[in-house]
Amino acid sequence: MWKDIHILLLGERRVGKTSLILSLVSEEFPDDVPNRVEEITIPADVTPEKVPTHIVDYSESEQAEYQLCEEVGRANVVCLVYDLTDLSTLEKVKLKWLPLIREFSMQDNMLPVILVGNKSDLIPDSKMYEAVPIMNEYPEIETCIECSSKTLTNVSEMFYFAQKAVLHPTWPLYSPQDGY
Ligand code: GTP
Ligand code: MG
């Protein structure tokens, strides 16, 4: 039984981590976004799974690497955000963020990750096919989702998937490597 859940948002600068948190909380797109917002606690009774949930922002411009290491150590799940209009940020997911999460994670099992393509309002069609090879390579990615903090599309779904990944993990119960 989980006492509470820590959701950490990571990803390259400007992909929209802070905007996603503020959009979830205020149900509108923030025009002015600070680099980082303080940890937000959502009480159990307003979360779909009825578990108190802490949402933690990270900003490379305000925090040092040791703080990143501490935050990953405290997290139960990471929402790893990239920008759908700048696929170099998805490349960084693979080359930088997923290896870093593996390195800093304190859990015996791998920390679950939700792969989040943000700014879907700016692209005409889904680019999910770009994320699929990375999903296949990293079993800790529970699911991927495309969303927009501007139009609020899939924002609450993203946080729900993150809660669900902690409470009802499909990995390591299922791993393609060992086939059960
Ligand atoms: P750092 O704190 O620097 O790491 O950036 P961040 O990942 O927190 O990004 P932030 O929320 O500051 O957003 C960066 C820029 O993208 C801002 O100008 C936002 O208004 C814009 N933005 C964020 N989400 C969306 C979105 O879904 N659609 C559009 N069109 N713009 C967005
Ligand atoms: Mg930010």
Image (tube, rainbow, N blue to C red):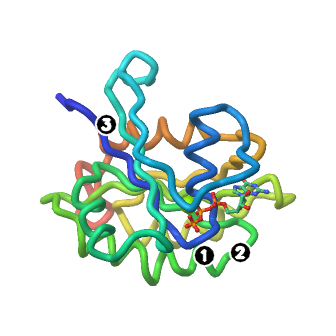
Mark 3–mark 2 Cα distance, whole angstroms, equals 32 Å
Q: Residue furthest right?
A: 124
> Looking at the figure, which quarter contains the N terminus?
top left
Camera-side residue of 163 and 70: 70
> Label 1: which residue?
89
**Above or below for 125 versus 47:** below
Q: Name the amino acid, label 1.
A: Thr
Instruction: Please give the count of numbered marks on the rendered protein.
Output: 3
Q: Name the amino acid, label 3.
A: His
Q: Residue at x 35, y 21 (%)?
A: 44
Where is residue 19 drawn, in percent x and y?
63, 51
Mark 1–mark 3 Cα distance, whole angstroms, equals 28 Å
**Above or below for 64 versus 54:** below
> Label 2: which residue?
86
- Earlier-in-chain disc, 3 versus 2: 2
The residue mark sitting in front, 1 or 3, is 1
- Residue 76 lies left or right of residue 33; in this view the side is left
> Label 3: which residue?
168
- Residue 98 lies left or right of residue 26; in this view the side is left
Q: Name the amino acid, label 2.
A: Asp
Q: Residue at x 34, y 60 (%)?
A: 140
Q: Are marks 1 and 2 in contact (CB under 8 Å)?
A: yes
Where is residue 34 drawn, in percent x and y?
60, 56
Q: Residues within 10 Å of mark 1 (few under 14, many from 20)?
A: many
Mark 1–mark 2 Cα distance, whole angstroms, equals 6 Å
Q: Secondary structure at mark 1?
A: helix
Where is residue 111 drawn, in percent x and y?
28, 58
- Residue 113 lies left or right of residue 91; in this view the side is left
Q: On the rendering, which quadrant does ligand 1 occupy? A: bottom right
Where is residue 176 drawn, in percent x and y?
33, 62
